[in-house]
């Protein structure tokens, strides 16, 4: 049930339109950025096991190279915005603490 709700919220975030009626999150990226599990955890201000749980539940897109997970940064940011607790950790403990204002 939790995974279903999280996946539903991710789809809603992807389909949300900005003020210019552009689906920013649904646009494809030419050269996506992939990060390791530990880098993803540091960026999000969360623990490694939280990232691995998201991988196991297919809530983030990833690829496996040399038996290592590489997580798509765009899908990680979308996942971190699905729950208030994860969003707060991103802003306060993760990369958000270095950014004065997010473009919301």
Image (cartoon, rainbow, N blue to C red):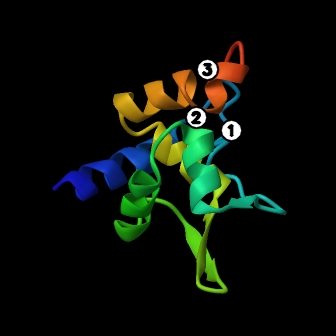
- Few, some or many residues within 10 Å of mark 1 (<14, 14–19, 20+): few
Residue receiving disc 2: 17
Disc 3 on helix, strand or loop? loop
Q: Is residue 2 left or right of residue 98?
A: left
Please name the residue shown 68% across and 59% down the image: 35
- Residue 62 or 67: which is nearer the viewer? 67
Residue 83 screen position, x and y as percent: 36, 35
Q: Tell me the distance, in whole angstroms, between the alpha carbons under discs 2 and 1.
A: 6 Å
Local secondary structure at mark 2: loop
**Residue at left 26%, top 57%?**
3
> Would you place residue 63 above or below residue 37 in this image?
below
Answer whether labels 2 and 1 touch (C-beta < 8 Å).
Answer: yes
Q: Residue furthest right?
A: 30
| Contact check, label 3 and label 2, Cβ < 8 Å | no
- Secondary structure beneath dot 1 equals loop
Cα distance between the residues tagged 3 and 2? 12 Å
State how many labels appear.
3
Q: Which residue is mark 1?
A: 22
Q: Which residue is mark 3?
A: 104
Task: Categorize mark 3 by other alpha carbons within 10 Å: few (<14), some (14-19), many (20+).
Answer: few
Q: Where is residue 69? Give x, y as percent.
A: 58, 72
């Amino acid at each position: 049930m939790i995974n279903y709700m999280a996946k539903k919220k991710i789809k809603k975030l992807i389909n949300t339109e900005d003020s210019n009626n552009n689906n920013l999150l649904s646009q494809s990226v030419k050269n996506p950025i992939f990060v390791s599990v530990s880098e993803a955890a540091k960026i999000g201000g969360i623990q490694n096991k939280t990232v691995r749980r998201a991988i196991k539940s297919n809530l983030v897109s990833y690829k496996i190279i040399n038996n290592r997970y590489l997580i798509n940064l765009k899908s990680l940011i979308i996942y971190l915005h699905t729950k208030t607790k994860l969003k707060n950790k991103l802003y306060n403990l993760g990369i958000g603490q270095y950014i004065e204002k997010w473009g919301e």
